[in-house]
Amino acid sequence: MANNQPASLAAVVADAGGLGTIPAAALSPDALRDAVRDVRAATDGPFGVNVFAPPFLRDRLVEVVLAERPRFFSFTFGIVDTAPFREAGIAVLGTATTPEEAAALEAAGVDAVVAQGAEAGGHRGTFLGSFDDGLVPLDELLESISVSVPVVAAGGIVDAGDVRRVRARGAAAVQVGTAFLFTRECGTAREHLDALRRYETVVTPAYTGRHMRAARTPVLDELMQSEPLPFPEQRAVSARLGPVYMGGAAARRAKTQSAAELVAELARGFA
């Protein structure tokens, strides 16, 4: 969750038995190196690093990942060459919003595909076809994907019941974002959480120029009245109006709790 979680959350999740992830898309190489080392010093558990795929991949982030060798590396918005990571012993995951994208990721050599359903908060990972093509509800997406690698379900998952449901549709694991915004260790601003409780969420490119799901606040409504600039230029325009709060369609069901409590709740779905 780039710009929405501290790297330290990855260590807390890893200690609780999950796979914590450092959101590196907005970090400099030096900041990423420091984050990886800080998380490694804080936990013996596995963790990963997530980035945006080219052309949005920041210079030298890949070099840092390969040098520091976290257990996992994941990407969204496209495809990253998987060979260097696999040769370094780093498991690779890519994000798909359609069956065609899942097949493309499998062909590119990923170890697992993250199936991002329409319910997911934040930016859409769509990279083939239109963003409308990529707005497939999670259950439907899981049932339509046919790959030989494990599939990780993402979007609208906040509790054990959600986990059991997506596992019944073929998911081997789950990736959870919005529910962690409500954990104490994430440190999410109160106004962000209140917006996700109060407003419905909507998918729109109005905030950054790339489609994403966020709370439909008056600020976002105003932004939606105009044609957005290309990603990421639109974000500078948006900043002049005020904050926009990303989050998933199931945010209202998310509980205020510790990260460890959330991981334990999700784990019950695998029992």
Image (cartoon, rainbow, N blue to C red):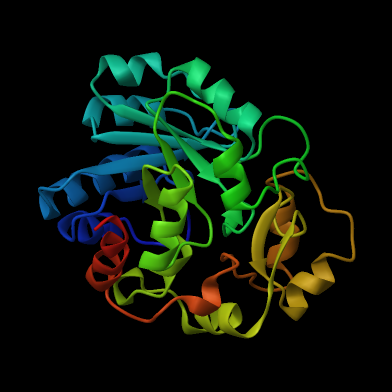
Which residue occupies the foreground of this view, 151 or 51?
Answer: 151
Say which quarter of the image contains residue 163. bottom left
The structure residue drawn at horizontal position 76% and vertical position 32%, both measured from the top left corner, is 129
Q: Is residue 40 above or below residue 243?
A: above
Q: Is residue 112 above or below residue 165?
A: above
Q: Is residue 139 above or below residue 243?
A: above
The structure residue drawn at horizontal position 75% and vertical position 54%, both measured from the top left corner, is 205
**Residue 22 shows in the view:** yes
Which residue occupies the foreground of this view, 65 or 268?
Answer: 268
On screen, residue 78 versus residue 85, left or right, reads: right
Position of residue 203 measured from the top left corner of the image (x, y, whole percent): 72, 59
Please tell me how many numbered marks the rendered image carries: 0
Q: Is residue 189 above or below residue 122?
A: below
On screen, residue 162 versus residue 100, left or right, reads: left
On screen, residue 200 versus residue 227, left or right, reads: left
Residue at the far right: name it.
226
Which residue occupies the foreground of this view, 225 or 215?
Answer: 215
Position of residue 57 measured from the top left corner of the image (x, y, whole percent): 52, 32
Residue at the far front: name it.
168
Quadrant, the C terminus: bottom left
